[in-house]
Every structure is written in C-alpha cells, then in structure tokens.
Image (tube, rainbow, N blue to C red):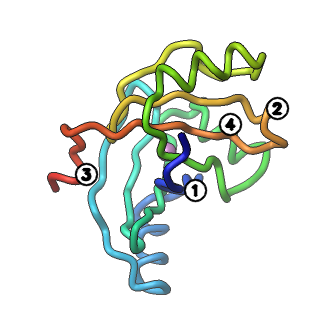
Amino acid sequence: MLLAIHHIGIAVKNLDEATRTYVSALDAQVEGTHDLPDRGVRITFLALGNSKLELMESIEKDGPIAKFIESYGEGIHHICLEIDDINKQIESLIAKGVRLKDKDVRQGLIGKIALIHPEAMNGVLIELVEKEDGDILEKA
Ligand code: CO
C-alpha cells in the first residue's frame, strides 16, 4: 500500500553549493550528509515538513548520477514512495510485468528499497522504501 511521498531525489553537480542554495532560499533544514560509495554518491537530506529532499552528487566520474547530469543536466532524479510491505509490492509488480531497475530489494539508509525502471513509469524513476526502526535519519 502506498503511504506517502518519502522524498524527492535531485541530482546536483556540487552538493555543498546546492545545500547552501536550498537552505538559503527555502530555509530547509539539513538532516545529514552521507557517503554511499557502493552507489557512487554523496547525499544530503533536507527536511521539509513530512517529506524530504535528497540532494545527490556523484563521487565517481562515471557514476549513475554523473551520467544522469551529463544526459539531462541537474534536476529531479527520482521520487521515493513509502510503502508498507516491500516484498509483497515487488511480488505484485513482477506479477504485473512491471519492469524493475533492481531485481533485488536492498538495504538503504532509510530501510529496504527497490527501484522501478523509469520506462515503466512514464519517465519517472520510482524508488520504493519500507521504513525500518533502524532508520538513521529518524535517529539523527
Ligand atoms: Co532516494
């Protein structure tokens, strides 16, 4: 079941500059910055009410975010939807023939995550998350 928009991911060239821009323009509150070497990104979460913005900078020359910016420029990269049972949701997506970007559910910062391919969702990369108690953002 869909519960909420958890966050919107934004690809940026320079994380520190982008963070300053968002904080200064929107009075957004920084929740934390994290290096995710396995995904080739450094991210900063900004709190905005019940939702968040995830600013993402590539830490690899040819990483997925670097390639995204090369193709489309900076901008919205994905929308993350919070759901209540990711395994059930994945089973249901597979049964419906919806193309997933990752076949396996993986452990993210917030909980278990999976990605639906943008070609299956009218050009939007959808990240699904089932939040867990160990959510480091909630603890921060
Ligand atoms: Co995200």
Camera-side mark, 1 or 2: 2
What residue lies at 47% left-to-right and 27% top-to-bottom?
A: 86
The residue indicated by pointer 1 is: 10
Tell me how far mark 1 sits from mark 2, CA to CA: 19 Å
Left or right side of 92 for 29: left
Amino acid type assigned to the residue bearing label 4 in the image:
Lys
Tell me how far mark 2 sits from mark 3, CA to CA: 30 Å
Depth check, front residue: 140 or 130:
130
The residue indicated by pointer 2 is: 119
Quadrant into which the N terminus falls: top right
What residue lies at 25% left-to-right and 51% top-to-bottom?
A: 137
What residue lies at 55% left-to-right and 52% top-to-bottom?
A: 9
Question: Which of marks 4 and 1 precedes in the sequence?
Answer: 1
Amino acid type assigned to the residue bearing label 3 in the image:
Leu
The residue indicated by pointer 3 is: 137
Q: Are the two marked residues, 4 and 3, in contact with CB atoms closer than 8 angstroms?
A: no
Q: Are the two marked residues, 1 and 4, in contact with CB atoms closer than 8 angstroms?
A: no
